[in-house]
Amino acid sequence: MPDWAKEIRAAIAALNLEPMHEAELVEELSQHLRDRYDEMLAGGTDPNAAYGSLLQELNDGALVSGLKASLQAARPPVPLGKDENAGILAGIWSDLRFGSRLLQKNPGFAVVAILSLALGIGANTTIFQLLDAVRMRTLPVKDPQRLARVKIVDSPHCCHGDFYSPDSDLTGALWNSLRQQQQGFSRIAAWAPARRNLGQGGEARYANTLMVSGEFFDVLGVQPLLGRLLSPADDYRGCGAQGAVLSYTFWQREFGGRPEALGSKLTLNGQPFQIIGVTQANFYGVDVGQNFDVAIPICSEPVFSTKGSLMDGPAEWWIATIGRLKPGWTIERASTQLAAISPAVFAATLPGEYDAIEKKDYLAFRLGALPAATGVSGLRHDYEDPLWLLLALSGLVLLIACANLANLMLARASVRQREMALRLTLGASRSRLIRQLLAESLLLAALGTIAGAALAQILSRVLVAFLSTHDNQIFVELTPDWRVLGFATALAILTCVLFGLVPAMQASRTDPGVVMKTGRGLTASRDRFLLRRALVVSQIALSLVLLTGAFLFVRTFRNLMTEDAGFVQDHLLVVDFDFSPLKLPPASQMAYKQELLARMQSIPGVSSAAETLVVPLNHSGWDDNIDIPNGPQRQDVTLSRVSPGYFRTMETPLLAGRDFNQTDTPNSPRVAIVNEAFTRKFLGGANALGRFFTDSGKPDQTYQIVGLVKNTKYYTLREDDLPIAFVSFTQANGPQEDSQLMIRSDEPLASLISSIKHTANDINPSLVLTFSVLKTQIREGLLREQLMATLSGFFGALATILAMVGLYGVISYMVVRRRNEIGVRMALGASRNDILVMVLREAAILLGIGLVTGTALALAAGTAAASMLYGLKPRDPLTLGAAITGMIIVALLASLLPAQRAATVHPMEALREE
Amino acid sequence: MPCGSLKAFLRIDPANLCLTFTRIAVPYVAMKHIAAPVDRELKKGSAELLILSLVEHRARHGYEISKLIDERSDGVLKFNVASFYPLLYRLEKRGWIAGRWVEKAGQRRRRYYRLTSDGKQILKTQRATWLDFVNAIHRITEAENA
């Protein structure tokens, strides 16, 4: 039989085809010629003649010329180790396409990888988005960097008087003086927040109002959506109830977004205001986290009170400021000018009612300017530190997820050794290999980031809802801005590098010769396995840190929840009665309060009721300085005014003496009831009954102690026991236009509220009522701790699961790798228990190193959280012990299955795999 | 089926072989004495159509296709390896046919070709063109004979 392949090869040599292509062509044509030859022979043709005829067909030149047009010549061979295309990004699309095909072929791995990344990146982006909204985002106004606020700075003894909000920086007198004498601001405005009732009698429905001076909107550079905004012409002394500007959200909610709302009336605490305009949708005021509802002129403030204008109160601190710096002026320069005018300003506004020491303190106060580009925010004050800590924790979770992924990539790289060797042999450079593997990682990172960013939109809204309470709805701008998008992108690149680069570099170090010779390509190098073990150790260490943190915060929350507040929290309803709409004469107001209390006490189902000036754990209070005769002078003490029966209502034990009663009148000697901390601090622990104390600076206001009660919490559950002195409502002259009652009842809440409303309506339908359940209020005060406990617990659990998966992977891999060795050991007499112990020992070594490292990290990192803990220290041994025990259990669970698999290896099968 | 439909000769239908013979043979016989280039041109022009039609319903390898052309044309149309395979590869390059190596039990592997969807469209077009051409020739030659 003629060698047709040889003839064909010779005939088409001139075409210079790719070797594989040429081989296929030769094969196909030889088959054809072979069949033709056989056919010709079968037809009786002489073999030589048949051969000659076919050879002539082959060599007449028509074949080569015909094939030239339809077949491509081979490209010049690429020298080993060199890339054909030298550009860095050449071939990047094919790498990405190849990467996506690989992921489609391994959907399980892809899903696990993308999910872990999505969770890690999602958590990080959520926290960052909140931080951005609360801390970094500037006000949505014109040129916010030029805004500043004025307040008293560098004055440790500031300030004495009544404070109306957390943002109260100045009194009315200071504001007026500042306005006249400041030079650094082209325009400066005053603002003050207040809740006003939209309803008329019955349960209150509050709107968040802003009382603003005429320049407020001008300073901020905001424009109206409808109508007009308040201007200096609207702000003049004695203006009464004039115009009101609605926020966009309020306008939508209350007026359905109808333009006809303009010109209609809006009632605030019974006072009618005419709606003159609506602000743009993106303007929420200057308090980040709070959305204002209605803005009214600051000159309208007196209409809400019968006591006179706050503007005239020398020690009424109720105003905040915001101003726009003059061109060329910096905040430092403005501060210097304000400091210079401070002595004159404070001298001119000195409150006459201050005692000598308070006056001395006041005259030493100094004004300064502070940046206001990001507005003010109670939310920021309460949650900035926890959010930064949570960002760090979620960052650790992401690191652990990346370590897991890196382990997975290393395992995959082991399996793909042969492919890498082949690529290197065919001319790929190491950098090209790395780039291809990084492209796959980049794809995973990109998909994980997209999923994580989407998850973050949902999670951040869930978190905001979690932090909102009935009385304090939180509004923050959660649309991702460039910072959030940049953060997510940076995370994508970082995670890609973290989990993709090292495995890629490891994979590219394959020795093609060795791999091709062994023919298996399944054995990982020592280095690669060492790296995997190092990754698992780091996972265990970081998980221990997170788990310890989680236990610390959960225990803190539990400690606070179970803290003895000094009274029984359950079944207590707080009812605020505002009877200012009744416009009672001041002289009759105190008697009215007593009658109101008596009516509430007589409601069926009410066990007891009492009035208090300060609701415990409401983050507000009253403090003053007292003198102890022959004892310490000018001591700061916390005060409250209560009615008889208060301690019985609160179920606070009366340890000695008596409660207030009706014999304590405004004309009888002043009496007080103190707590244990008071006697310990001021009386050396001696018997307090019969002792006296005096209001510092007012020697005629002397109180005799008639009772001793157990310590109770005042501002927060976290505080150490404060010395508290209680004085009686029966000895107060007032006037006062509201009553805060604590009502204890076992009745269902809804029916109790209904009874109270009914009774109040009988008394006077114009009474305005606000209800809150004390226990709920206290619980809402622990939201920060609840947030830390919940999220750190979630991160701790997630990290532990990831570490468990990582450890399981490495131990399983170790078992596979040492299968042969295990077979030999068992053949030489090792029992199943011996093998079990061998594998568990490997896991124990990794665990041990991880725990030691993790403990050191946990102890170091614990100091960052110290201020947020309660009832335990960061280095609490019980907590650390529990976390270590948890990790040991998890490690045991993770290693048990691979260990059992190793112990059930059949020696003969294992040995056959040699 | 009566030998009446011109389309029938393009189909692989044994019943129409008589038509095929009649209709093709006549122009062939008539043109046999004309110079060879015309013959080569006809063969070249119809070759694509023939190959496409032979793989329309079934994948075939190269030798099978060339043998079928030879047999069904009764030796009138013959392709040698030098003229056939360049044509086959050209059709493959255009995407009208797709080749695939197939290994059957007990046999050497062979490269089988099947018609692609683009090829189906081209086949339809080429059939119509040939039909018009043959009709036109027929009308002229019948008119002369009439």
Image (cartoon, coloured by chain):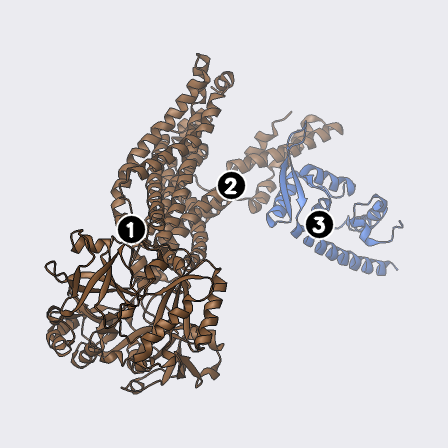
Chain colours: A brown, B blue
Please tell me in which quadrant of the rendered image residue A652 appears.
bottom left
Q: Nearer the viewer, residue A781 or A461?
A: A781
Judge left or right: residue A524 versus residue A101: left
* Chain to which mark 3 belongs: B
Residue at 18%, 54% (x, y): give it: A681
**Rendered location of residue A115, percent (x, y):** 46, 46
For label 3, count other residues whose C-alpha is less than 10 Å away and answer few (under 14), some (14-19) or many (20+).
Answer: some
**Cβ atoms at labels 1 and 3 below 8 Å apart:** no
**Rendered location of residue A605, percent (x, y):** 47, 62
| Vertical order, A702 against A886 (above or below) | below
Of callouts 1 and 2, the N-terminal one: 2
Amino acid marked by disc 3:
Leu
* Chain to which mark 2 belongs: A
Residue that label 2 marks: A108
Q: Secondary structure at mark 3?
A: helix
Q: Quadrant of the N terminus of chain A?
A: top right
* Chain to which mark 1 belongs: A
Amino acid marked by disc 1:
Met
Whole-number angstrom distance, CA of label 1 to CA of label 3: 85 Å
For label 2, count other residues whose C-alpha is less than 10 Å away and answer few (under 14), some (14-19) or many (20+).
Answer: few
Q: Secondary structure at mark 2?
A: helix
Whole-number angstrom distance, CA of label 1 to CA of label 2: 41 Å
Which marked residue is nearer to the observer: mark 1 or mark 3? Answer: 1
Residue that label 3 marks: B49
Q: Secondary structure at mark 1?
A: helix
Image disc number at residue A655: none
Residue that label 1 marks: A868
Residue at 11%, 68% (x, y): give it: A357
For label 1, count other residues whose C-alpha is less than 10 Å away and answer few (under 14), some (14-19) or many (20+).
Answer: some
